[in-house]
Amino acid sequence: MITSTTLVYLIALPLAGSAILLLAGRRSDKWGHLLATALSASSFFVGLYQLSLMLGRSNSERPITQKLFEWISVGSFKIDASLMLDQLSICFVLLITGVGTLIHIYSISYMSHDPDRRRFFAFLNLFIAAMLLLVLGDSYLNLYVGWEGVGLASYLLIGFWNQKPAYATASKKAFVMNRIGDMGLSFAIMIAFATMGTVSFSGVKEAVDHTSTAALTGIGLMLLVAATGKSAQFPLQAWLGDAMAGPTPVSALIHAATMVTAGVYLITRSNFIFDAAPTAQLLVVIIGAITLMFGALIGTAKDDIKKALAASTMSQIGYMILGAGLGPVGYAFAIMHLLTHGFFKAGMFLGAGSVMHGMNDEVNMRKYGALRKFMPITFATFGLGYLAILGVPPFAGFYSKDMIIETAFNSGGAKGIILGCVTLLGAGITAFYMTRVMILTFTGKSRWDDEAHPHESPWLMWLPMAILAIGSVTSGYLLSHGDALVNWLSPLFEHHGEHEELLSPMVVSGLALAMVAIGVAIAFVKYSRNEVASVAPTDVSIFTTIARQDLLQDRFNEAVFMQPGQALTAVLVKTDEAVIDGAVRGVGRVALGSGSALRGVQTGFVRSYAALILLGAVALVAAIWVVTQ
Amino acid sequence: MTFNAPVLNYTLLSPILILLGGALLGVLVEAFVSKAMRAVTQLSLTVGTLVLSLAQVWRIHNEQSMSAAMGSVIIDGPGVLLQASILIISIISVFLIADTDHFTALAAALPGSEEERHSLESGNQVTEVYPLTLFAISGMMLFPIASDLITLFVALEMLSLPLYLMAGLSRRRRLASQEAALKYFLLGAFSSAFFLFGMAYLYGYSASVTYAGIRESIVGGSGNDVLLLIGMAFLTIGLLFKVGAVPFHAWSPDVYQGAPTPITGFMAAATKVAAFGAMLRIYYTVFANAQWSWSPLLSLIAIVTMLFGSLVAISQRDVKRMLAYSSIAHAGFLLAGVIALNKAGLEASIFYLFAYGVATVGAFAVVTLVRDSSGEVTDLNRWKGLGKRSPWVAISFAGFLLAFAGIPLTSGFIGKFSIFSAAYESGAKGLVIAGVLSSAIAAFFYIRVIVLMFFTDPSQDGTSVQLPSILTRATLIISMAVTVVLGVYPAPLLNLISHFSTFIR
């Protein structure tokens, strides 16, 4: 593989920004945000430069690596801190730094009234660096460092306004739930090391052939656990809604476009494991299918615009995970949907932020309405994102989502039909809840409070939204034109024979559009024709009640994990106090007592000290005599 | 009888000769340099001498010689490493000694007399402490490389006599300081007598005072074993006295407490390196073949020393006495390295001595900083809440205590781990168990001090932390850096020690 010396700058630039901003403290308040944005942008340009180099090389020579230093060297176990950039990571690098830079720019204005703006930018830069390390690491262990790094940045940013206890709790919840996933990743690494003796991607890939299916399934399942934690997939999905406590740019960058897609990256990167472990792969598909429905259903009942979008993110990542679980034919489509989603979802989140900005940070959509007239640019950019997520041609989502639906149908047998129907149904529900968001926010009569004075956001905010909107419109076409992305990624994945086609692309598109049309129509009938109450009605169906409570995910977690867990800790604390502390205190007391007694020997008289020495000498000689007799 | 003119290899002896020369120059400085200039001249002369000596040690670090001084000293890897350790520890100790606030104005004046008051008022200083320090260091440098008993004894007295004096130089609580000095002297003389007695027996056993001669007799097994055993026992008593092992430890708490704190730090750290250096050489080369006779008893002493030091330290209320008992416990741990009697044990002991010595100087440097209007505050109850008032000083003290306790990521952990694993390898399992147990007991009082500093509200009694001078700060920073670096990344030093640590005989 070609070695490079410039890869490290991708990470080093934002990392340096974070360090400077944190170490310089308040002194950098004036210019910190500009520096952070500039560094993020330079990292993006390094990424573009790497892409241009990569395009100039032949397919097999495209991956490059850079060894930073020997990290761990214990006996035969050697790990280098090395970076690797290949066709897959470059997609992520450009997404992370590109969308990241736009969100930096947006945040300059969005956070301008916050006294801690500098700290916010330091964390943003830290996140960019960690996320880049995640996608550039050349081994599971290097990836793990980035994985933990983004977890930390996410924790810090969700709880950025930690003066509000609810926000601090939300960040803690995200952190704790992510720990479960992280544990999965560490188990996967351990199993890989124990059975294969290596944890580098290339090493594991080679070792797959002579590793038992049981071990591979174990690794795959543990990787899946990791992915469900980071990507908010069932059953570890509950933290994402609460994570919306963070400032909106954070939701756009971390909890929509990049970090939450790390699970998809992990599964795609580990394609060689999942291809060899069909059970794990099947479970990936099932998790994806469950989550895409789960998220979509929650989305239908949310009145909080950010939570509705978060539910939608969960659901869209479900699509990606499902795509990645479909094996070699699905990986590229999962990545394509990930990229297009990065554009349209980040754009919509920024739009939501723009709306909140103009509405005194109100998030309840029932207090919006008719904002189209007051925020035309936001309406336009949000609207383009809306069309993209619905999958209306020729917007981005049409290409990427239809590909996943089509691949699902064509994956064969009953599995194909079930998955196809789930994805189709999901598309319909998506159309319903997104239309609901559009109608509640931008059309109809105004329902806002008297003190609200909606206005369009400054150009620093709408410019990134506009750029992302362009991406929402064009990215799908560009990535799928001539199978661009599929061909680009194809050297990374094993290929099998073509599947038989159950449904032709035209039919799938037709079905999907029909579902979307139905979803949109229902939403129109329900919310546009009727008056929308500015207070959420309480006399609703049992289904709505449940969906409003996130399909009872928190109740479930509390009943199944939290309460038994608390009981267990209570017992452990009791045991600890009674047994272990008791023993420690006992030892302490005995030691203290004997210490005080022995201290009595220390009289301070030199004659008694001399006598002690003499006694010691006599005892020593006597002992020698005894020993040698 | 013809007299052969002695042939000396001056290059190999130069580290010691430079120190002696520097000390003599220091005496001249006392006589001829004006009072105003004396302190700064002495300080620069002393530090310069030490650095020069260290440079010489570096120059000879690859040499090996039995004949540098007519067979009286051996220059080899361990000797050089120990000398370098002593010099480095001495340099950072001298930085502490430079703070004249610890020393009396006129050592000869009666405490509380008119004469003392007068000399205090006229701003006198005992700059004699610098040449005394250099003399003591030259003795310490000679101690671990001596290769006959006469030289060993001379070195012992060379290092001890200046220390007796230095212990009595405290500016505050002068009576206690003088009492400590006198105790140290009397008991030191007493133990020297044992030492000499042992030498005589060994001479009687082997008709030789050289290490090589005695070893030959032991290997040959021709002599009278009673003479050997008594000789070994008495010689050992003299050495155990210096390192403060039970039951020959009684002087150390009183002397540690009474002596001026910078001297305590120097004494605790450098003397231990020198004495254990000599002990390692004697046991690893001279007595190695008589292991059956001394190993069980030395193990017993080591176990008792560890447990005693750790247990009694718990009930101490005075920080200097606590550190004294902690140093006793550490003497026990270090004895485990002697008993191990394998290469790993030697390497571990040298690492431990250096790491422990540096951390000790650092800990006493912190003690010099905590003061009220009448001098240092050593009562632990008045250290409450130190972490809230002076976080940096408290954090560094906590760091040194954690190193003493052997908590991972500090040099103490690596030291303890390597020394216990060496002892375990050699089969001394009981010793290792006792060592780990007493480490656990010791951790109790180290951590209690940390709790006291960080989790207790400060007392309002005028205790404050002196802003460290540049030199004290240098000592603190160097010792903290060494403690942490050796804990996190000890491999380079361990490799270096491993490369050099073979005694030649």
Image: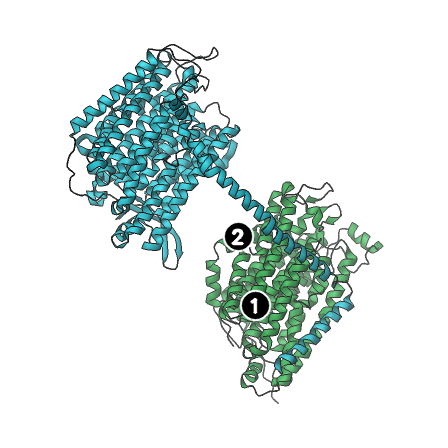
Chain colours: A cyan, B green
Whether labels 2 and 1 belong to a single chain: the reply is yes
Q: CA distance from mark 2 to mark 1?
A: 30 Å
Binning the other alpha carbons within 10 Å of mark 1 as few (below 14), some (14 to 19) or many (20 upward) gives: some
Image quarter of residue B52: bottom right
Image quarter of residue A313: top left
- Horizontally, residue A586 falls left or right of residue A40, namely right
Residue drawn at 57 percent across, 88 percent down: B222
Residue A28 in the image: state x and y as whole percent: 49, 31
- Horizontally, residue A423 falls left or right of residue B370, namely left
Give the label on residue B430, or none. Answer: 1
- Viewer-proximal residue among A6 and A448: A448
Residue B466 in the image: state x and y as whole percent: 67, 45
Chain ID of residue with mark 1: B
Residue B225 in the image: state x and y as whole percent: 61, 84
Residue drawn at 64 percent across, 50 percent down: B448
Q: Which residue is mark 2?
A: B484
Q: Secondary structure at mark 2?
A: helix
